[in-house]
Amino acid sequence: MHKAELLASIQAKDKAYDADIKLVRVPMTKTYHTALTPDRHPFAYELYVSTCYAFDLLQYGGEANVKRAADILEVVVARQDQDPSRSTYGIWPYFDEESLDEMDRPDWNMADFHGKKLALILKRHAGLLSPSLIGKLRGAVYHACQAIIIRNVGPHYTNIAIMGALVTLLGGELLGQEEIRSYGERRLRTFRNYTKAIGTFSEFNSPCYTPIAIEELHGIYAESGTAGAVADAEELLDLAWHMIAKHYHPATGAWSGPHSRTYSTQLRPNEKAFLEHALGRGQGQEREQAHIRCPEKYRYLFTSTEERYFTEPTLKADETGYQNYATTYQNERLSLGSYTLGSMWNQRRNLLGYVDSGAGNAVSIQLQFLKDGKDFCSAIFTGVQSRGRALFGFNLATDNGGWHQDLDIINGRFRARDLRIRLLLGGNAANAELPTTQTGTGFVTLIGETALQVEAVVDRSDYGELQLQVERSEEGLGLDYVISTGEERDFDFHALERAVWIFELSLGEDRPLPAVDIQSSESWVTASIQTDDGLAAIAVPQKPRKTGELYKENKVQLPPVLLKQMA
């Protein structure tokens, strides 16, 4: 963050700072972990935001800023659980109004997030703070390191695996604790080896979390005195930047899918700013001094309109028992990306497209499975893609959640008013003419000069036939396949004998959708299409079953061109 942005960030938090409480008061937006609700607590004093504010104040400098930062840090450190006998040892609650014991499942990631900022404060700004506060900060970093070591997150949890390595590496170096430092070094090496074995991050292609991974890796690269960790961080930084660059779509300014996790289908301002900074754009000499940089060898991908078409594995199949491939296709007008497998929860983008609709307006195409208007993670996606064409289906899990697979478990039994499958045309869709026609079980929509076609080719469920509907909302245009709607009713996936829906989609193709060959038995449905890249197919069981079973039993056949590419 350069000086002007740092000042703007500080000034925004200045307005929310309470000089009596010595914390920043923010609108209540969190939905995970906290038991506080916006109706009862529309605002709350957030500890991590306050820690970041203190860090920024010290970065900017000045006597008044240092004094305020010290005041904040005194409060933040006092809120950490420093009792080694407790299960929440070393972590912080989200809010000053809510203790760890009062939370709906405390968030152990807070040891990593706070620990990182406090370690960097000790390393960069210890000379500005009193010996008493320095002692407290050292203690807080020690406790955070212990919490991280006790938890011992595996390498599959990309960002926390890296962040925990950063905290323990720097913490061990600063505290003179070799056991902590060596743990951080081993943790990063384990993550590097795990990631190299896959060929990419398991938290794959995430617009919100890949920049964080880069920031943490850069922190190790720039701040650690451990040579082996610095070398590992440099190697992982290269991998991360290549992943971003090859997915960036210059025509729409979009980060192409699929996305393992994201909070927005369109890039958020902070994500755009991260890329702008890293590419050295727009701020003259001051920008040129930014530390985090995209390697020169990948920068051409942020402007090139060349056709791109690739697929890659995203899991260690020997660990999970199954593989999930990610395919991306781009040309000068559009991009389409998809997984072969995944839950339809709200942070996941299993099938995602972007189209230049003209005049610099980009329209996004997001596949959703909705329960009462919210993304529904008990729906399991299976798909295969050949350039701008996709064949995909859904079946249902009996042991998963509603809006979250851990925090909202419903185990296939719930009450709801509405279940539907939607292709949401968002982004600049509200400003674009999107003429849409419905023919039988399909939709055809024109996005600028680009045609989007989708058709339901298998509709087998005990809920009856799908009903087609076009719905306009603030989010955009929904091309909907309605499974059930009306009065609230009971749903029980365990009682279903069949529930499977398969679709064919084409983006940017003027020719009609190819015929889909459907083969079925009492238990299974197989759908296949002939593409320019060869045969592509999916096979899925009709009866709902457990998530792990579906992940292992839902099958795909990638086009031979993509299989050859990976060989």
Image (cartoon, grey):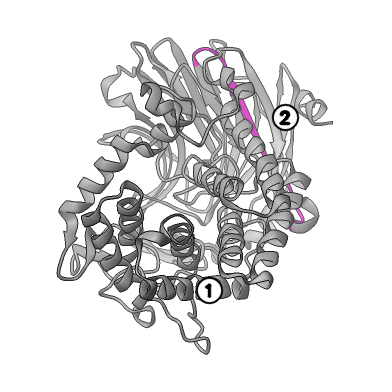
Q: Which of 201 and 2 is in front in this view?
A: 2
User: Visible in this render: residue 500?
Assistant: no
Residue 436 vs residue 459, the one in the foreground: 436
Question: Which quadrant does the N terminus fall into?
Answer: top left
Circle number at residue 142 = 1
Q: Give the range drawn in magenta.
A: 320-333
Residue that numbered label 2 is attached to? 536
Quadrant (top left, top right, bottom left, bottom right) of the C terminus: top right
Q: Which residue is drawn at 78% across and 47% down?
A: 197
Q: Does the magenta stretch include residue 322?
A: yes
Picture coordinates of residue 487, whole percent (x, y): 29, 57
Measuring 50% from the left and 41% from the top, which residue is drawn there?
211
**Dot 2 amino acid type:** Ala
CA distance for labels 1 and 2? 53 Å
Tag nearer the camera, 1 or 2: 1
Identify the element where label 2 is drawn: strand
What is the number of callouts on the image?
2
213 w.r.t. 425: above or below? below
Up the image or down, 541 lies above or below 503; here it is: below
Q: Camera-side residue: 500 or 246? A: 246
